[in-house]
Image (spheres, rainbow, N blue to C red):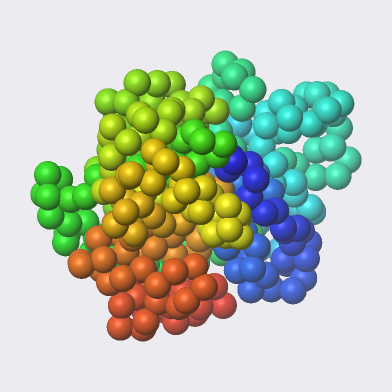
């Protein structure tokens, strides 16, 4: 199972956003992946450059943007500077050409000119260029991508406020972690047909935006074949996983397919004569992992989830997929996030 199996949803058009107000962004773009554009990586936000397409505009701390029907532009790799005055396709154009039959660079130009521009950066999932094309493609963190989208939808104050919530939670988690040699070892993987498909929880890219900030101690770096299998499809054997014997096992992407995890993957591990010997299995420390395709709201909940799964003594027990975290054990303020999504960024 790959990150591409994540559930997709129809995102609001820019015209709908401008018609109905800023709250629509909370249910789509902020929540998870909108088309192709989840992002991540806990690095500082780099504000994009917004420039007007006419001479009238309003000065802001991060650039100049228009506030009427005159249009404006935002710059992000791989598109370059994109002008907005109608609808937008949140699909990385290189990703589209690489994965959609019948679409080439000429078609992308036609769609851009007749319908609306493309605006996304899919390569930042694992910091590789879609299709392997050698360009000046730039990689962004989740929060850098969010700041770009905030420019498109004219809600930069919300992206900054959400990032402050995330930064506060990560600072709290990291300041309470014990030295590395006192933390449990962790394997991030998927179990399928008797083999483990493994992932590096500290790898750059938005695919590990929820694991990297928790500074997990990877149990697998010395396992043969591990480096080649990160974000690819090469498995390692059950015996190799047992040799590493992680203290904690996190089933990658299980949040996106909870029934498969609960009814198939977990029972198969427990029934396998070798996998059942893993310390994580015997000690009931096998957990569902977060989605690699995630937006900022998913990222908040998935960082909290990962911290609780790995260090329940520090951050409270993980209650499971269908149970809420008790208010006194929450690592970020839910009401604060609701207020930000609704447009109240005052603090």
Query: Residue at 50% across / 41% down in the picture?
Result: 191
> Quarter-wise, where is residue 329 in the image?
bottom left
- Residue 189 % position (x, y): 44, 41
Question: Could you say which is closer to the camera, residue 166 or residue 185?
Answer: 185
Going by the image, does 9 lie left or right of 256? Answer: right
Above or below for 106 versus 262: above
Above or below for 288 versus 238: below
Query: Residue at 27% across / 72% down in the picture?
Result: 316
Above or below for 136 versus 62: above
- Residue 252 % position (x, y): 48, 47
Query: Residue at 43% across / 21% down in the picture?
Result: 228
Going by the image, does 251 lie left or right of 257? Answer: left
Above or below for 130 versus 322: above
Question: Could you say which is closer to the camera, residue 185 or residue 11?
Answer: 185
Question: Could you say which is closer to the camera, residue 26 or residue 324?
Answer: 324
Picture quarter with the C terminus: bottom left
Question: Could you say which is closer to the camera, residue 214 or residue 145?
Answer: 214
Is residue 187 shown to the viewer in this render? yes
> Quarter-wise, where is residue 175 in the image?
bottom left
């Amino acid at each position: 199972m790959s990150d591409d199996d994540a559930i997709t949803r129809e995102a609001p058009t820019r015209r709908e956003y401008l018609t109905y107000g800023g709250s629509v962004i909370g249910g789509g773009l902020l929540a998870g992946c909108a088309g192709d554009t989840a992002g991540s990586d806990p690095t500082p936000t780099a504000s994009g450059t917004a420039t007007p397409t006419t001479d009238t505009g309003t000065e802001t701390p991060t650039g100049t943007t228009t506030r009427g029907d005159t249009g404006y532009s935002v710059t992000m790799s791989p598109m370059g500077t994109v002008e907005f005055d109608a609808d937008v396709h949140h699909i990385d154009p290189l990703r589209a050409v690489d994965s959609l039959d019948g679409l080439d660079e000429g078609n992308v130009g036609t769609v851009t000119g007749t319908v609306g521009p493309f605006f996304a950066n899919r390569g930042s999932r694992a910091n590789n260029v879609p299709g392997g094309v050698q360009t000046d493609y730039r990689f962004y963190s989740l929060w850098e991508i969010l700041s770009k989208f905030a420019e498109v939808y004219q809600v930069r104050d919300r992206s900054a406020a959400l990032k402050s919530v995330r930064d506060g939670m990560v600072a709290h988690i990291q300041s309470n972690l014990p030295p590395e040699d006192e933390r449990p070892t962790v394997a991030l993987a998927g179990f399928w047909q008797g083999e483990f498909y493994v992932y590096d929880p500290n790898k750059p890219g938005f695919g590990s935006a929820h694991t990297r900030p928790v500074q997990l101690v990877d149990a697998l770096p010395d396992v043969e074949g591990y480096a080649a299998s990160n974000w690819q499809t090469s498995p390692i054997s059950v015996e190799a996983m047992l040799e590493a014997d992680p203290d904690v096992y996190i089933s990658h992407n299980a949040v996106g397919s909870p029934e498969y995890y609960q009814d198939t993957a977990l029972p198969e591990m427990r029934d396998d004569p070798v996998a059942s010997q893993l310390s994580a299995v015997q000690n009931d420390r096998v957990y569902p992992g977060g989605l690699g395709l995630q937006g900022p709201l998913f990222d908040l909940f998935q960082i909290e989830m990962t911290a609780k799964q790995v260090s329940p003594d520090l951050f409270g027990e993980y209650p499971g997929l269908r149970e809420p975290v008790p208010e006194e054990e929450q690592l970020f303020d839910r009401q604060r996030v609701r207020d930000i999504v609704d447009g109240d960024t005052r603090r």
